[in-house]
Amino acid sequence: MNRTTRLCAAVLSGALLGLSAACGGGTGGSGDGELVYRTWDEQQKKGLEKVMAAFEKKNPGIKVKIELLPWDQYWTKLTADVVAGTAPDVFWMSVPQFPEFVTKGVLADVSDVVKDPSQYNKNVVQSYTYKGKLYGVPKDWGAVGLLYNKDLFKKAGVEMPEKLTWAPDGSGTFLPLLRKLTVDESGKHPGESGFNAKQVKNWGFASWNHYQTQWMNWMVSNGGKITDKPFGKFAFNGPKEVEALKWGVDLINKWKVSPPAAQTNPPSAQATEMFQRGQVAIFPANNALLPFVQPEANFKIGAAAMPEGPAGRAVNINGLSEAVYAKSKHPEEAKKLARFLATPAAQKIMGEDGYVFPALTSLNHTYVDYWKKKGIDVQPYVEESEGKTFNLPIVSGFSAAEKGLNQNMNSVYLGRTSPQDGADKAVQDGNAKLK
Amino acid sequence: MKTTTIAKPRETAPDTTGPAPAKRRRKLNLTPYLFLAPSLFGVLAFLLLPVAIVAVVSLFKWELLDSPTFIGLENYRKLAGDGDVRHSLWVTVLYVLLSIPVQTVIALGLALLLNQKIRGVKFFRALFVVPWMATPIVMGVVWTWIFDPANGALNKFLGVFGVDGPNWLSDTAFALPAVAAVQVWQYAGYNMLFFLAGLQGIPGELYDAADTDGASKLRQFVHITLPLLNPTMFFVLVTNIIGSFQVYDTLYVMTEGGPDKSTEVLNFRIVQTAFQEFDFGYASAMAMLLFALILVFTVVQVRFFNRRTTYDIS
């Protein structure tokens, strides 16, 4: 092979790097009587092993193999496996990805194995319902609430009140609390003369571009909406939504109670780390973050409900389901596993070990008990889930739209684009990618 | 590499040990082909076949979970009018221009410095190669911390001199240069190795002779070192420019193409289109475009270096 050919080969290989990954074959198919169950969560794998062991004990002759794929590869690989017809028998499904898969007939109807959907968290059931049928066993739920640094509260001499309120104009009890918790190197608070936003020791809050825990919650709790209807289009650029978005940005650029977006914008987002390091007092987070934050934090963590906006409190609830592959080679066994995963026996294990709130709401206490032992009272999350809640957008093509949403909102949080223009552009770019 | 000629590769090496050429020509000797087979298989299966597949896929409308439909050159027509793609092309070229010249000059400078007899030279040579050994993803994360506008090491350092550092990764003016700087940092030391090897292949007598003739160090560099480094320069430039065109991992960690698409290189669009939007046909057309672009750049370089005299000093 001469030099030119070799160069051409090198060039070719490069151009293809990205796409050749798609040619990988599936590993989903398996031997007789062995089911494959796929997850992306390394932490939960231990709990899942217990669940599968319990299932195997009850169903001699059926073995379950747990496959762990990192999040970054999960959806790519799953899609490739579906194309090849070798997807795993049972696999994790998330709300944003659900419409794409269910409309293409990849998921099996599990209405027959989940007998009474009303016993499960209603948001999760809604999220995985398509044309009146359930396409996934509700696995768990998590809500957005406030995690807070009790040490910083003590230092500032304040307590977390029972109830907090916010409004777009800055009225309500939330903003004054954040002002008290924000303190610069010389001990001054925002609003006081001489306060230096460039030399802040502790921030009261972290307002940042994270749709699930931030701006979507403000929008709905201001009486706005995210999409026009399930399987519809984005519609968060009306006056109520823009007002709420502006509130999120004002917390940073106007009221100076939150670190600048240059530090917190994804993908280099440092907001979670700043809370973990003790630089941020109040941090809105899904309770699923607890197992990651709690062991790292060298301060006492408290949990509280999100503040109430003009339209009351509205929090995002997100949950996973365990989907059954419609073309599984072991449909009987896969359904059997699905039926077991829906039972209290299976769901209790995941709650008792503190991984997640089980989707079966009667088991909420198992998760609460676990975290009580760890010193964190997560009851506010349960109360939130019983109030006004909303789902992540159920639109077909969310993964394609997500980047446009994030990029436009990054600009808004930086203050480079006005909330109205940013929301208009995000809706426009987002809808252009939907199917 | 130090003795390879680029301009005129030797036609055939004179064979003094084997049987007479006339005799050998009569029957086909399979042995060399057998030895070639494994790498030939690799090239076919992992290079040429995927290229062919991508070329074919680019003629289809294929959203992964649907079945493909043949649409001829429709994807390419779409490419021609796609403002996002044009923007990405520009960003890609800009990235190459920002990274390659600086990286090459630093690599050559380091090689010249470390080609001297100084104490601990081996230690320094190793030290500068260390960045290359790190995973780009990990590097990206670490540099993200360094570039953090408030807590980052870089702005803290600038602050010592009273300079108010910019928001590196969230400022459209600084994000691309910042990511390019990470590449320079990561690959300059590695490329230094090639230059070092090239420098050590230059016979010392040439410099002795130049000294005798009274040529200055600068003249020696321009008229001896640089021309004799031609093959190395060719290799370093070609491989690095190809690598720069394909940058993805550091950008993925540090900017995700932002802010405002200011770092959205073509590779990023390809991955986004293929794996987030699942539009494989269109992504394949973009990959063919990137391929063509790299090919053009490489051919231009081959032409350029071919026109220059190359010295065989073996």
Image (cartoon, coloured by chain):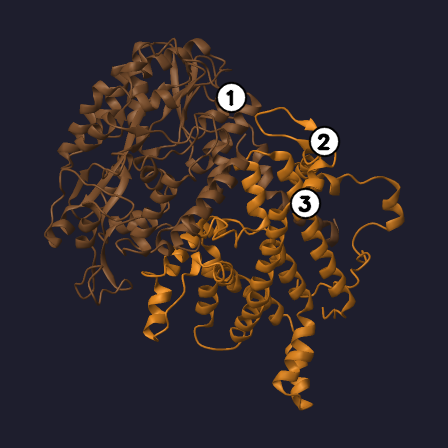
Chain colours: A brown, B orange
Front in this rendered view, residue B186 or A394: A394
Q: CA distance from mark 3 to mark 2?
A: 17 Å
Label 1 sits on residue: A103
- Residue B265: percent from left, percent from top: 57, 51
Q: Are marks 3 and 2 in contact (CB under 8 Å)?
A: no
Pinpoint the chain carrying mark 1: A
Question: Does residue B84 lie above or below A303 as drawn?
Answer: below
- Residue A113: percent from left, percent from top: 36, 10
Label 1 CA crowd tier, 10 Å (few <14, some 14–19, many 20+): few
Indicate the amino acid at tag 3.
Gly
| Residue beneath the point at 67% across and 90% down | B212
Indicate the amino acid at tag 1.
Thr
Q: Is residue B15 left or right of residue A400?
A: right
Label 2 sits on residue: B71
Q: CA distance from mark 3 to mark 1?
A: 30 Å
Would residue A231 be visible to someone looking at this image? yes
Label 2 CA crowd tier, 10 Å (few <14, some 14–19, many 20+): few
What label sits on residue B81 in the rendered view?
3
Q: The C terminus of chain A is located in which quarter?
A: top right
| Residue beneath the point at 31% across and 56% down | A254
- Residue B277: percent from left, percent from top: 54, 35
